[in-house]
Amino acid sequence: MIGDMDTRFGTALHITDQSHEYINAKWEEDKLNSIDFKLMSVPPHDTPILGMVSRPPVQSALQYGYNADFWVEYSSGLVDLSCKNPLKPGENLDTSPPAKGADELEFVVDGSRTLRVDTNATALVVIDMQNFFLHPDLRDHRLGLKCVDPLLRVIPVLREKGVKILWVNWGLTDHELKTLPPALIRGFRRPQSIREGGFGSELPGNFGRLLMRDERNSDLYGPLQDEYIKGQKRGTDFWIHKNRMSALWDRTALDLFLKENGLRTLLFAGVNTDQCVGGTLIDAYYRGYDCILLQDATATTSPTGGFENVIYNAGNSYGFVTDTGRVMAAQ
């Protein structure tokens, strides 16, 4: 209608019906592009969840956590997990990290960060690298077999640095067979088997009963078994049984061992990435452990996406991602 007045752009305009729609659209466009509107449209408490992979470097030293359990991140890219040097009040601008101690280790992780860990409080957790999952006579797990050599290279290096090696494996007892939940039992039984098969059943080829303790199929695969025995004799390696996908689903043997030995920083490796490894890593994160996944020392038989999802979340939510090469280059 001729004679309508519009003062939204600072001047009085006479507009027609034909131009009214255009002006309304133009006003909405200008409003959406205005800085004030953009700021107002962002919820005031909309804090992005950014892990170390995607988080920009800090401008000054920043402490996460409190004096009983904390990390300190420095502008240099160092993230100190040693839990030894809390920031003092007001000590964050231009603060340099303290000198690395003799019992501390530094290595690079994804996200252009360097971790500092206390070797006395650190363990490598190797999950399910057993014959049942890796031996060619029982399973085709070519990606899992590719993890063997990286582990054989990095384990001696970590031992020399004082890091404990924990071999966490399926190892059921006859009593535990009667306590397993239905979903778990179903997952390890062939669909066509009604009464036989599954946990505790006899495997062909003298591999023994399926994932029972002290059976051949429950042994570590090939050279890994020899590597464990070598470390066991030195007092650096420990065999820990589990009876679920996650080795930390309850008050488990692994949980008790970690607490009794003051271990809080965990490097994860093994198979399968998105099942037993991922389940244990997530439960460790829930319990407050520092979680670091060795990308070249873990694998899965799952379709594309299973492995990648765990790698993404390990670095962006649960902790950090690195590889055995960077750990071996640790100073």
Image (cartoon, rainbow, N blue to C red):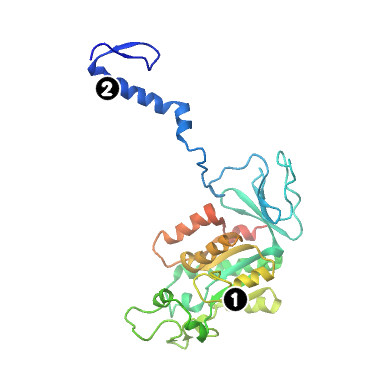
Quarter-of-image position of residue 185: bottom left
Lateral position of residue 77 relative to residue 248, left or right: right
Residue 306 image offset from top left, x and y in percent: 43, 61
The residue where tag 2 is placed is 21
User: Which quadrant is home to the C terminus?
Assistant: bottom right
Which label sits in the foreground, 1 or 2? 2
Which amino acid type is marked by label 2?
Glu
Residue 313 image offset from top left, x and y in percent: 50, 55
Number of residues whose C-alpha sits closer than 10 Å to that of mark 2, classed few (under 14), some (14–19) or many (20 or more): few
Which amino acid type is marked by label 1?
Ile
Residue at (60, 43) in percent of width and height: 57
Residue 175 image offset from top left, x and y in percent: 51, 85
Q: Is residue 212 above or below residue 68?
A: below
Front-lying residue, 154 or 133 = 133
How far apart are labels 1 and 2 at the CA level?
72 Å
Residue at (70, 67) in percent of width and height: 160
Q: Which callout, 1 or 2, points at the residue further toward the start of the chain? A: 2
Q: Is residue 179 above or below residue 37?
A: below
Please tell me the numbered disc located at residue 240: 1
Lateral position of residue 28 relative to residue 219, left or right: left
Front-lying residue, 164 or 279 = 279
Front-lying residue, 139 or 15 = 15
Residue at (47, 67) in percent of width and height: 275
Q: Identify the element where label 1 is drawn.
A: strand
Lateral position of residue 90 relative to residue 178, left or right: right
Q: Is residue 87 above or below residue 156?
A: above
User: Which quadrant is home to the N terminus?
Assistant: top left
Residue 83 image offset from top left, x and y in percent: 70, 56
Residue at (36, 86) in percent of width and height: 195
